[in-house]
Amino acid sequence: MSTALYLSTLLAQVGSGRLQGGWEYIWASYAIAWGSLSLYALSLWIRRPKADAASKE
């Protein structure tokens, strides 16, 4: 098999080199990121230091 024929056969198997679709993975990664940040913010709010009643006077 010649090199040119082998190369053209190999390139035909690879495809165009562009991803088709995949937006579901992008939206899922955004949802995971925002969910993680929201849970972290909630945990900080829950663990915040409480003000004493005596310090308000």
Image (tube, helix red, strand yellow):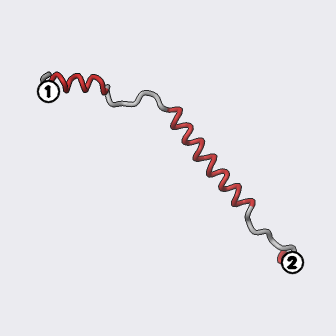
The amino acid pointed to by label 2 is Ala
What residue is drawn where x is 83% and y is 73%? 52
* Quadrant where the C terminus is found in the figure: bottom right
- Which residue: 46% across, 28% down? 21
Q: Judge left or right: residue 50 versus residue 24.
A: right
Q: Depth check: give the residue in front, 55 or 26.
A: 26
Q: Is residue 15 above or below residue 35?
A: above
The answer to which of 36 and 6 lies nearer the viewer is 6
In the shown orientation, is residue 28 left or right of residue 48? Answer: left
Does residue 30 appear left or right of residue 20 in this picture? right
**Place of residue 45 in the rendered image (x, y in percent of width and height, measured from the top left):** 72, 60
Mark 1 or 2 closer to N-term? 1
Mark 1 and mark 2 residues within 8 Å of each other at the beta carbon? no
Residue 5: image x %, image y %? 16, 22
Q: Secondary structure under badge 1?
A: helix
1 relative to 33, above or below: above
Q: Nearer the viewer, residue 56 or 2?
A: 2
**Residue 20: x %, y % from top left:** 42, 27
Q: Amino acid at mark 1?
A: Thr
Mark 1: give few (<14), some (14-19) or many (20+) Cα within 10 Å: few
Asked which quadrant contains residue 48, the reply is bottom right
The total number of labels drawn is: 2
> Would you identify the image quadrant in which residue 49 lies?
bottom right
- Left or right of 27 on screen, residue 55: right
Q: Quadrant of residue 46?
A: bottom right
Residue 1 sits above or below residue 22 on the image: above
- Give the residue at mark 1: 3
Spatial distance from mark 1 to mark 2, Cα to Cα? 86 Å
Q: Position of residue 51 (x, y in %)?
A: 80, 71
Q: Could you tell me which residue is drawn at 30 percent across and 24 percent down? A: 13
Residue picked out by circle 2: 54
